[in-house]
Image: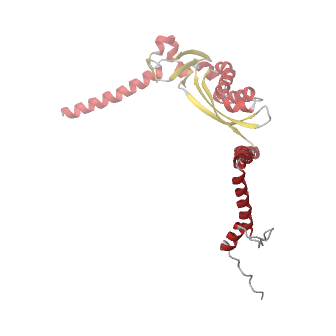
């Protein structure tokens, strides 16, 4: 019996608490504002007030007795104040050289003024997107292609400075803006640029190879020239050396005569010719006798028979 009474009492308290909170909230006696949100109260076409701080609040203490009828005759807006981000892909931009480029642009935004966000623009998010896109086209068009591909930080600052003043009029606060991608939009132009890059690489490779070949030829030519100079010096010194030796030999007439006679006989023997020696006076000669008695150094080979 006691348990049943306790259960019934708990159920009545639970249901009663639910209805009490429902009617007190419906009357506007209290409101719970979630973190990162704001509540805007409008009564008879006028903004009654804004609650931005998260937690439990009493509209009556803030706005007076009008808070009791705002939920009946007015309207309450819940605005998300948290940071949001968006990415715009391939925004069409022309470079200074006339190349059709695409800009990928990422930006952050959050609502700074809930009243302006609700009443000053029917689509503030779409307007901000269009404003950022137009600012990118205005600020980044007619830039040099090299600057467009390299200076993304300066480009991001230019777009942000262009958009911020107007976006704040609509209640939006523009955060970070960053150019994430710069690319060519024309496929045929991309192929032409790839072809030019490949041809340039081939030219550079051929120039490096030709320079290496030229260096090798220079080294080889220099070595050959130095070797020719040294050989020429040696050839020029040979007659001097031979002449000095012969002058020393010629100082003794007997040695000179014997030397020249030996050299003459050596040349005759090396030539392989048949020599007939006849003394001028018909008498015997020691050298002639020695040559006749000596065996031939190079035996004579009989000619092959003809077929």
Q: Nearer the viewer, residue 79 or 289?
A: 289
Give how far across and how far down residue 194 sits, in percent.
Answer: 72, 45
User: How many dots with numbers?
Assistant: 0
Residue 187 visible within the image: no
Is residue 249 shown above or below 269? above
* Residue at point 68%, 26% (across, down): 155
Residue 189 position by quadrant: top right
- The one nearer the camera, 231 or 10, is 231
Above/below status of 206 relative to 86 = below
Q: Which residue is drawn at 72% across and 81% down?
A: 302
Q: Quadrant of the C terminus?
A: bottom right
The quadrant holding residue 47 is: top right
Residue 238 locus on image (x, y percent): 72, 48
The answer to which of 278 and 244 lies nearer the viewer is 278
Q: Where is residue 59 in the image (x, y as percent from the top left)?
A: 48, 15
Q: Which residue lies furthest to the bottom in this view?
A: 307
Q: Where does the N terminus fall, quadrant-wise? A: top left
The reply to whether residue 14 is in sight is yes
The residue under the point 45% across, 15% down is 58
Q: In the displayed structure, does residue 291 sit left or right of residue 69? A: right
Give the side of residue 149 with respect to residue 34, left or right: right
The percent position of residue 290, horizontal first and vertical second, equals: 67, 69
């Amino acid at each position: 019996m006691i348990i049943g009474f306790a259960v019934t009492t708990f159920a009545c308290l639970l249901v009663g608490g639910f209805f009490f909170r429902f009617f007190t909230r419906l009357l506007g006696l209290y409101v719970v504002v979630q973190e990162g949100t704001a509540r805007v109260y409008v009564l008879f076409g006028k903004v009654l007030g804004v609650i931005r701080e998260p937690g439990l609040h009493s509209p009556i203490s803030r706005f007076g007795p009008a808070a009791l009828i705002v939920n009946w005759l007015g309207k309450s807006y819940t605005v998300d104040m948290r940071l949001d981000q968006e990415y715009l892909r391939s925004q069409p931009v022309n470079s200074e050289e006339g190349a059709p480029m695409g800009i990928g642009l990422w930006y952050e935004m959050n609502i700074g003024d809930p009243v302006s966000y609700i009443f000053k623009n029917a689509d503030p998010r779409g307007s901000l997107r269009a404003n950022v896109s137009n600012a990118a086209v205005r600020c980044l068009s007619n830039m040099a292609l090299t600057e467009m591909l390299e200076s993304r930080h300066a480009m991001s600052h230019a777009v942000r400075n262009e958009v911020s003043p107007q976006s704040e009029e609509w209640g939006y606060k523009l955060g970070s803006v960053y150019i994430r991608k710069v690319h060519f939009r024309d496929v045929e132009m991309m192929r032409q640029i790839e072809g030019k890059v490949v041809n340039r690489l081939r030219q550079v490779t051929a120039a490096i190879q030709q320079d290496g070949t030229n260096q090798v030829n220079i080294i080889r030519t220099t070595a050959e020239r130095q070797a020719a100079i040294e050989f020429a010096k040696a050839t020029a010194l040979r007659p001097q050396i031979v002449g000095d030796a012969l002058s020393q030999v010629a100082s003794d007439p007997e040695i000179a005569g014997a030397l020249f006679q030996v050299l003459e006989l050596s040349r005759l023997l090396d030539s392989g010719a048949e020599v007939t020696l006849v003394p001028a006076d018909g008498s015997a000669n020691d050298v002639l006798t020695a040559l006749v008695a000596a065996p031939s150094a190079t035996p004579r080979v009989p000619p092959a028979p003809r077929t």
